[in-house]
Image (cartoon, grey):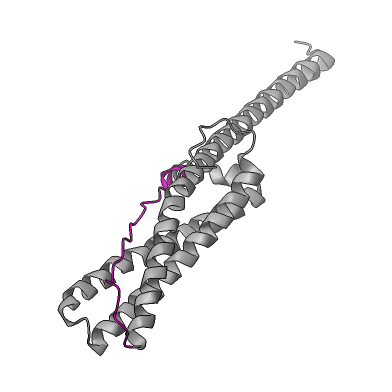
Amino acid sequence: MKVNTRKAIFEFSSIVIAVVLAMGLTEWRQSYLNHKMAEASFEKIVQEVRENVAELKTDSLKMANDLKAMTEWVRQWTLKEKKVPLGANFSYSFLSKSALEVARINQSLTFLPGDKVLAIAEIYATQDFYSENAAEIFHLMGDLQGEINRSESQEFFASVQKLRFHMRLVFNTVKAYLNESEDFLEKYGTGINSEQTTDE
């Protein structure tokens, strides 16, 4: 049986080209889907940051007032003046990070540009620092409550100073978070259709 070499080579080449094209199209489609998923995840993160900013703006005002009152109380205690009642209305905002966790689970951060990944990492690192130190405030407030009957003692004064130090740390962290987040939203949040929750 005589084999038509030219025809065989043509058919083989056609099959190879078809397979390569199919693989290329599959890879292109998967890459397209990965990047679509990454952008969808990024939009969710932008919205989450927006909501966290709105939550913290109110709390930052309360903390500023608390610090002002505590500073005045410390000044009066030091000068042996009649002191204003000591009060702290600290409220802890639970900042969500579920959008980030979902992006980590579906590995969509891998398909985002490096500048976006870095910006996300910085914001959520500041958020974690806030969460850790804000939780510590409640322990210190509990300690202070236990010594409230000894408000003239040096121990009570030291506890107030410790609480004030941590509250200032948290307050400065909140300010840093708000600055970072607002820069992030200004750079990446425009053009993303989402409900504005911040107080302008």
x, y percent for residue 44: 50, 38
- The magenta segment is 80-102
x, y percent for residue 27: 64, 31
Q: From what the image shows, is residue 129 above or below residue 199?
A: below
Q: From what the image shows, is residue 43 above or below residue 82?
A: above
Which quadrant holds residue 128? bottom left
Quadrant of the snapshot with the N terminus: top right
Is any atom of residue 121 visible in this view?
Answer: no
Which quadrant holds residue 186? top right
Residue furthest to the front in view is 82
Quadrant of the snapshot with the C terminus: top right
Q: For this view, does 167 lie left or right of residue 85? A: right
x, y percent for residue 28: 66, 30
Q: Which residue is drawn at 66% across and 23% down?
A: 22
Q: For this view, does 89 lie left or right of residue 174? A: left
Magenta part, dominant SS: loop
Q: Which residue is drawn at 25% across and 82% down?
A: 156
Could you say which is closer to the camera, residue 110 or residue 145? 145
x, y percent for residue 58: 42, 51
